[in-house]
Image (cartoon, rainbow, N blue to C red):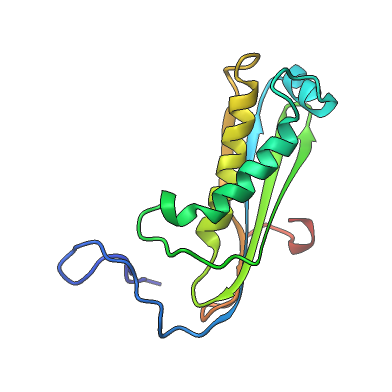
Amino acid sequence: MQHELTHIDASGAARMVDVSAKQDTRREAVAQAVVRMLPETLARILAGELPKGDVLACARIAGIMAAKQTHALIPLCHPLPLDGVQVELCQMDAARLRIVATVHCTWHTGVEMEALTAASVAALTVYDMCKAIDRAMEIQDIYLLKKAGGKSGVFLRPGCDEGKL
């Protein structure tokens, strides 16, 4: 299936897509990021033993703030009237922290970029708050898990169980 690039006009110039004719529907997107680190680093995060403070709370707030500012960070994104942003952080195993961002609104364009931005900035915040003790941390697996709403309907990442996002 071939899709037309919507942010490029016929002459190849960048453009912001006109979404004014689209119907307002409830839009939701879920994205994730994973931060791999030393097991000792993750243990200290979970125990609240880092000198910069509560890493999980700070990353959660950073993700929420980032979702609200996506239009200022990503060229050609529309400013959206977000109704809700949720950022969850949980231990995957001894060395990985998973971040899941869920964003929703009722409007006429999707919120995938807001969810991806929230997960990414939350992961960057974890790195920033822990880099003094673990500079080798890696931010991995940033991708869209699910999107719903709009003309294209529901997308669920292949291999994902919707009940376990």
Residue 137's x, y, as percent?
60, 24
Looking at the rendering, in which quadrant would you find the N terminus?
A: bottom left
Residue at the spot x=84%, y=25% of the render? 47
Q: In this view, which residue lies farthest toward the top?
A: 133
Instruction: Name which quarter of the figure residue 49 lies in.
Output: top right
Residue 72's x, y, as percent?
42, 52
Instruction: Name which quarter of the figure residue 56 lies in.
Output: top right
Q: Is residue 138 above or below residue 27?
A: above
Residue 13's x, y, as percent?
19, 62
Residue 81's x, y, as percent?
56, 68
**Residue 141 in view in this figure:** no
Residue at the spot x=22%, y=70% of the render? 9
Instruction: Name which quarter of the figure residue 93 lies in.
Output: top right
Q: Is residue 141 above or below residue 4?
A: above
Q: Is residue 129 above or below residue 123?
A: above
Residue at the spot x=74%, y=38% of the render? 57
**Residue 57 in view in this figure:** yes
* Left or right: 130, with 13 as reference point: right
* Left or right: 8, with 89 as reference point: left
* Left or right: 56, with 66 as reference point: right
